[in-house]
């Protein structure tokens, strides 16, 4: 057993020396390793890419901190839907249009003639979280789903969907990228 312990101890020491740069053979080993990596990476780059200039990427303005405290006066009927009030959380301005986030209160009682219209949003990302109440939705490929307090879902770009029904007290948190987007209502 003493032999096994000594072997383990020697192995641990060798590993420590190799990784801490204290071992005599470390420099030689690192040089070989670097050379191999360099050769491999050079071999992977096509000749056409070496000479092609890199496209200029547009720098996005620096994002700011956005702090939003709950105030009833902040809920406005100035959003996408006439049957909803929106509380903007300041994300669009702080992110220079990268994303938007708002709390939505759907105004009850639900009127399916006004609410249940098949549509899609031309977005990169959309996520909804039910803060309070419930909402019944329809999404292509998913069918009807009842979302209750604590439920969350994402809607892939341009997925056809609609709201079917909701509770009088429903509140939703919605996050969308980008902040400005187009909504297309579809004929059924």
Image (cartoon, rainbow, N blue to C red):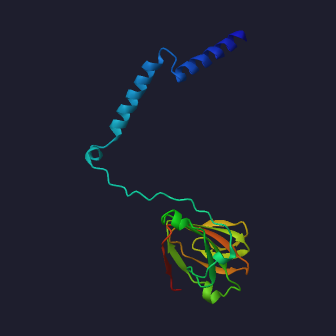
Q: Is residue 3 left or right of residue 121?
A: right
**Percent of width and height locating residue 80:** 55, 80
Confirm whether residue 176 shows in the render: no
Q: Is residue 98 above or below residue 105?
A: above
**Percent of width and height locating residue 165:** 68, 81
Q: Nearer the viewer, residue 71 or 184?
A: 71
Q: Nearer the viewer, residue 131 or 72?
A: 72
**Percent of width and height locating residue 53:** 28, 50
Q: Is residue 96 left or right of residue 81?
A: left
The structure residue drawn at horizontal position 48% and vertical position 73%, both measured from the top left corner, is: 181
Q: Nearer the viewer, residue 86 or 140?
A: 86
Q: Is residue 138 above or below residue 154?
A: below
User: Where the N terminus falls, by quadrant?
Assistant: top right
**Percent of width and height locating residue 136:** 68, 76
> Residue placed farthest to the top in the image?
3
Quarter of image, res 10: top right
The structure residue drawn at horizontal position 63% and vertical position 81%, both measured from the top left corner, is: 84
Confirm whether residue 184 shows in the render: yes
Q: How many marks?
A: 0
The structure residue drawn at horizontal position 43% and vertical position 58%, both measured from the top left corner, is: 60
Q: Is residue 165 above or below residue 27?
A: below
Quarter of image, res 100: bottom right
Quarter of image, res 163: bottom right
Q: Is residue 143 left or right of residue 60?
A: right
The structure residue drawn at horizontal position 68% and vertical position 10%, both measured from the top left corner, is: 3
Q: Is residue 62 left or right of residue 104?
A: left
């Amino acid at each position: 057993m003493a032999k096994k312990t000594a072997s383990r101890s020697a192995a641990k020491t060798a590993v420590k020396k190799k990784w801490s740069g204290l071992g005599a053979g470390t420099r030689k080993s690192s040089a070989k390793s670097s050379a191999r990596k360099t050769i491999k990476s050079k071999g992977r780059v096509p000749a056409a890419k070496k000479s092609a200039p890199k496209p200029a990427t547009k720098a996005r303005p620096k994002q700011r901190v956005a702090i939003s405290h709950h105030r009833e006066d902040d809920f406005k009927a100035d959003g996408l839907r006439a049957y909803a009030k929106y509380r903007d959380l300041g994300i669009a301005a702080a992110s220079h249009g990268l994303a938007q986030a708002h709390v939505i209160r759907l105004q009850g009682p639900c009127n399916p003639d006004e609410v249940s219209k098949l549509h899609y949003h031309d977005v990169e990302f959309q996520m909804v979280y039910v803060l309070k109440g419930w909402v019944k939705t329809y999404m292509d490929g998913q069918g009807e789903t009842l979302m209750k307090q604590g439920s969350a879902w994402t809607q892939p770009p341009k997925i056809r969907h609609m709201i079917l029904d909701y509770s009088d007290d429903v509140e939703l948190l919605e996050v969308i990228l980008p902040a400005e987007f187009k909504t297309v209502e579809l004929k059924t």
